[in-house]
Amino acid sequence: MARKQGEVMWPRLVANKILRKPLGSNNFVTDFPGNDGPDGLVLEAPSFDQPSSNSTSPIFNHHKDTNTHKYKVFVSTWNVGGEEPQQDLNIKDWIDTSCDIYVFGFQEIVPLKASNVLGSENSSICMKWNSLIREALNKKTHYYSQDNLKHDKHDHDGNPNIIESSNNPREFEFHCIISKQMVGILISVWVRSNIRPFIRHPNVSCVGCGIMGCLGNKGSVSVRFRLHETSFCFVCTHLASGSREGDEKLRNSNVADILSRTSFPRGPLLDLPRKILDHDRVIFLGDLNYRISLPEAMTRSLVERREWNALLKHDQLMMELKEGQVLEGWHEGAIQFAPTYKYCPNSNVYYGCRPGNKGEKRRAPAWCDRIIWCGKGLKQHEYGRGTSKLSDHRPVKAIFTAEVGVLRTLRGYHSFFLSQRLDKISSQFQVSSADDFLCKGSTRSSSFKI
């Protein structure tokens, strides 16, 4: 019977992928299942006509009678080359503990072979990555003492942060609000406990751009949510590979496909953004696969001499952005680190620098792994790469401050939601962790010097 079921399921899975049949915007793993789906629970304070006398926001925005607060956002991307994470993999040193939101993007968490591309997702690998993230975030936070928190009330610009000191250490734990996998692409979003009640309408949207233009060996997994009155969208991508002349146009085409095909529900009040670019804060992260348009020998020579500026003049993504061929008007921080691809296994030596097999592709070094953004209200403070030798790519991270609109009528109830009473409220709805849901096979929705 099991064999017969498998024979039925395989063609159905393949047909759904080829026909681009969506899995649903609420089909994801979360620590808070059932929380704020299309008709889900929203932990939100009631609105009153008079603003709270306790409001001490540093910035006032007259639009929609909101205050503007700043949150720190950690974003990372890593193509792990189909390598499973081992229990001793240390991602703690990679994480900046002062952030409020963490977005982890991965590519090739499983080998891109036919059984993985055409079959069902291998959730056990996703579970391993989420377990490592949970342990790293909450262990690091455990040592982030209350004394430190009392002195950490200012952002990079010296403005007060929304995060305040508290006697309740659980407010500074991190929980997964969205984790979603499509073949080898995984995105996992984590937030501090004390801002989770203000996050609403989490959704996902997957776009396959790979084999036949629709399978998930290449493509994107996009997640979105609203924090207070500001919408966020994070797009984790793996674009077309190839170092031949003109291959950058395939990557441009992938981006156009992702922007046009990604779609989110409008919500019960029809007031939520539907497309990626309709959101207030948008960040693209992933193995974008853009290469350096120079002869291989010249590229390797400039890399050896660490002449990054000379190389970046011929970086395909920068050239395409400048010419308006892709993502016109988007921004990227200054690149002051070595190319992230392609390394020999467990080595700091670039692939092709050592004698290889006859006819083997050499693949010149390139900045394949990137983080770019669009829209106002985002400011990048850090952009760098890690040193882990797990795969032939090096991980890349960026840290932003994001401006978020907060209704003034909610400020009087801020202390209520961040008090110990919140723990009693939220515990009634917390069914299981992301790790538990992955183990049980549930699909309702469950940062790294590496």
Image (cartoon, rainbow, N blue to C red):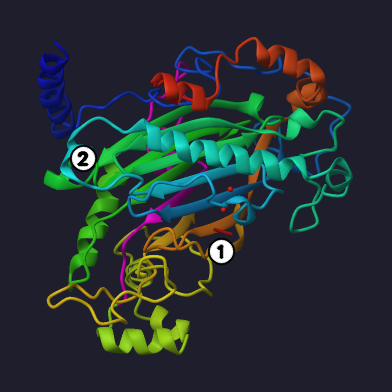
Quarter-wise, where is residue 310 in the image?
A: bottom left
Residue 53, placed above or below residue 319: above
Q: Nearer the viewer, residue 109 or 30?
A: 109
Residue 267 belongs to the span the image colors magenta: yes
Quadrant of the rendered image containing residue 197? top right
- Residue 137 is labelled as none
Q: Secondary structure at mark 2?
A: helix
Note whether 43 is above or below 118 in the view shown.
above
Q: Are marks 2 and 1 in contact (CB under 8 Å)?
A: no
What residue appears at the point 70 percent right and 45 percent down from the top-left corner? 140
Q: Which residues are magenta?
A: 264-292
Position of the C terminus, as image quadrant, is bottom right
The three-letter code of the residue at mark 2 reads Val
Judge by depth and name the residue closer to the eye, 342 or 258.
342
- Which mark lies nearer to you, 2 or 1? 2
Q: Which residue is mark 1?
A: 383
* Mark number, residue 117: 2
The image shows residue 177 at horizontal and vertical percentages of: 54, 30
156 lies left or right of 124: right
Q: Is residue 199 left or right of residue 367?
A: right
- Compared to residue 403, the image places residue 178 above or below, namely above
Q: Residues within 10 Å of mark 1 (few under 14, many from 20)?
A: many
Q: Main secondary structure of the magenta part?
A: loop
Which residue is located at x 61 percent, y 47 percent? Answer: 73
Q: How many marks?
A: 2
Q: Is residue 377 visible?
A: no
**Viewer-side residue, 348 vs 236:** 348
Where, quadrant-wise, is the N terminus in this rendering? Answer: top left
